[in-house]
Image: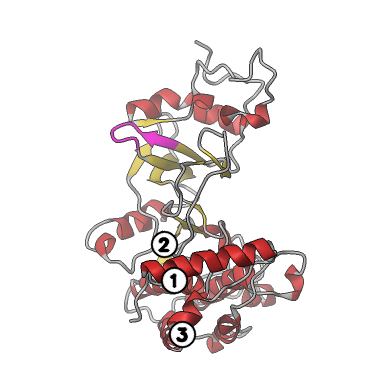
Amino acid sequence: MASTSTPHPHLSEYEIWWRSHYDFLREKGYKLRSRYSPDWVPSWTNTNEVDINCEDGIVPPHYLVLDARRIQDGARVSLKRIDVSRHPYEIEIGRYFSNSPLSNDPANHCVPIYDVLEVPAENHTAIIVMPLLRDATYPYFDTVGEVADCIHQLFEGLRFMHRHHVAHRDCMQLNILMDDSMFIDPWHASDQYMSEDYKRVARHRARTKSSPRYYYIDFGISRQYEASNADPLEEPIFGGDKGVPEFNEDNFKPRNPFPTDVWYLGHAIQEIFLDVKYHSDFAHYSGVEFLNSLVSDMMHSDPAQRPNMDEVFSRFQIIRQSFSNWKSRSRVAHNGERSVFDFLAHWARRIQYIVRRIPPTHTSLS
């Protein structure tokens, strides 16, 4: 058996860390992919294959996060390595939302924490175990109803956090994920376009047919406040999205983080769905103009002028009330799917849903 901490010609430095903890994780009930086994021999060895075409040749996209299987039941999970000295509240806030009764509330869209592992011989390192989630923006949205379901859940989830006096402080696009409800094939955690065995494109259904659940992740800079503190103030801390107007105006002045959360989410929705001049090179959707006014207000340059999440959620319910079933089934065309074939495929699905009486949305007005 090779030493687990020595360099490997096919593993990056951060992957070596995961390999060195392969046996520890297995003892705790979690099995990493073969790539991280101390006995791993690349599957392309002595073949004509190249590494990028093999399941065990794909490098994970994030050095702190890796997928695994829970040995007890085979469930796919995500392992996140955290430095608790830098992020002292991540576990506390994650557990707060993961425990009953909050974990049973359907409005809770915080990623659940299944387990927390203390890493031996590393005093400030822990591994949190969560469900394996995926990019919420792919596959593309097909209908107004699918977009409405997504936005409903995102507004509902952030409102839920705020009602429990927690500011996320980094609810940008990359920290919004979804479960695998749409997928027929398990997908490869390091290349979500492909199947887990890396032999084909991962097959999926449309969101209308198999509606996903959306989640907020990454509570590394989140904070919880006393209910009596109506206007908490925090020194600005830049998350993944660097465009917050009040931070760029004065990045030393303490601010209330709740209106900043509203801006972050508005900007995430803008990035995913709406055409904006500084994203002109990227693909976006037509047919989602109903979001424009609300998102614009959420992104007001003056934090005091932004609606709070109760107001955001209520306004979106009013918008949805105006949708007929036909409107909810109408197409939102992504720039990457505007061919005649895509148009006909949409109508084939649409007719099928009507015939089979599959509802156009899966979230209720409230």
Relative side of 292 to 218, left or right? right
CA distance separating discs 1 and 3: 13 Å
Q: Which residue is mark 3?
A: 323
- What residue sits 67% from the left and 21% below the top? 9
Q: Residue furthest top?
A: 1
Residue bearing the label numbered 1: 149
Using a 10 Å C-alpha cutoff, classify the residue at mark 2 as few (fewer than 14 neighbours), some (14 to 19) or many (20 or more).
Answer: many
Q: Of the residues under marks 1 and 3, which one precedes in the sequence?
A: 1
The kind of residue tagged 1 is: Asp
Residue 151, image x, y percentages: 48, 73
Relative placement, left or right, of 43 versus 126 is right
Secondary structure state at the residue bearing disc 2: loop
Residue closest to the eye, 92 or 27: 27
164 vs 110, nearest the viewer: 110
Q: Residues within 10 Å of mark 1 (few under 14, many from 20)?
A: many
**Which disc is residue 211 wearing?**
2
Above/below status of 74 relative to 241: above
93 within the magenta span: no
Q: Report the span colored magenta.
A: 68-74
Q: CA distance from mark 2 to mark 1?
A: 8 Å
Q: Is residue 148 left or right of residue 198?
A: left
